[in-house]
Amino acid sequence: MKNKTIFITGSSRGIGKAIAHEFCHMGFNVAINGVNPERLETTRKELLKIIPNILAIQGDMSVYANAQAAFKQIEQTFGRVDVLVNNAAIAHVGLFTDMAPAEWNRLIDVNINAMLNCSHLALPSMITRKCGCIINISSIWGERGASCEAVYSLTKGAVNAFTKAIAKEVVPSGVRVNAIACGVIDTDMNAFLSSEEKAMLVDEIPMSRLGTPTEIADVAVFLASDKASYITGQIIGVNGGM
């Protein structure tokens, strides 16, 4: 998989950062993205210790013009995007009736529209070349639903539905699209949980522990490889049996 380029949205920390690390070790050109410039630069410097072909792109991919600029920068630097990982996401915990429209619209923008924008920009080249891979980072809550995370669950359900539908649309052109439905992963997104709340979640997990970002990254590496050549339109659960 060397001499290929991967673009990972929301990759300055957490799952996205772990995916970037793994693909650096695979010899990819790696384009990372985030909205926080300091955190993005810190991650860029970390990755440069592994491989020199790192491009850091600051910006919100839910804005189509920002996504266009990102793809133009990647193409000018590396030539093309071979693998797109739509990882950028935010969460909101609280009763739906306490949410304001601006709050749920923001979740929809980041969790759905950023995926649509980047997929829309990546696919034409992939279709023309008759190869390419898109991996969408989803959640177990998109399948099961989570109390007090109704809109987050909605957005991840939409990620799953889009994955299944677009996979059928583009597979005749040699492009594969899959999603990873993460269980409870030990990331900054879950840092707000108290130790008691984490313990309650662990009690629901047959494997009796939280997942790690690297375990998600390992699945992403597999899905991007030729070993997954007959896998498309799938929602792969990585959840410790939850």
Image (tube, rainbow, N blue to C red):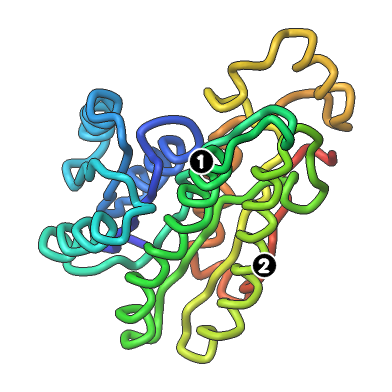
Q: Who is closer to the viewer here, 203 or 26?
A: 203
Q: Check residue 102 in the rendering and tell me which mark sits there, or answer none.
A: 1
Marks 2 and 1, how far apart in space?
24 Å
Q: Position of residue 39 (x, y in %)?
A: 30, 25
Q: Who is closer to the viewer here, 154 or 55?
A: 154
At label 2, counting other C-alpha atoms closer than 10 Å, the crowd grade (few under 14, some 14-19, many 20 or more) is some
Q: Is residue 101 above or below residue 165?
A: above
Q: Position of residue 20 (x, y in %)?
A: 38, 42
Which residue position holds label 2?
161
Secondary structure beneath disc 1?
A: helix
At label 1, counting other C-alpha atoms closer than 10 Å, the crowd grade (few under 14, some 14-19, many 20 or more) is few
Q: Check residue 149 in the rendering and tell me which mark sits there, or answer none.
A: none
Q: Position of residue 187 (x, y in %)?
A: 56, 26
Label 1 sits on what residue type?
Ala
77 with respect to 224 (left or right): left
Determine which quarter of the picture holds residue 114. Answer: bottom left
Residue with the most extreme bottom position = 172
Q: Is residue 82 above or below residue 221?
A: below
Secondary structure beneath disc 2?
A: helix
Asked if the residue at tag 1 contacts the one at tag 2, i.e. Cβ–Cβ closer than 8 Å, the answer is no
Determine which quarter of the picture holds residue 223. Answer: bottom right
The quarter of the image holding the N terminus is: bottom left
Residue at 17 percent of width and 68 percent of height: 79
102 with respect to 182 (left or right): left
Residue with the most extreme left position = 76
Residue at 67 percent of width and 46 percent of height: 139
Residue at 84 percent of width and 39 percent of height: 242
Label 2 sits on what residue type?
Ala
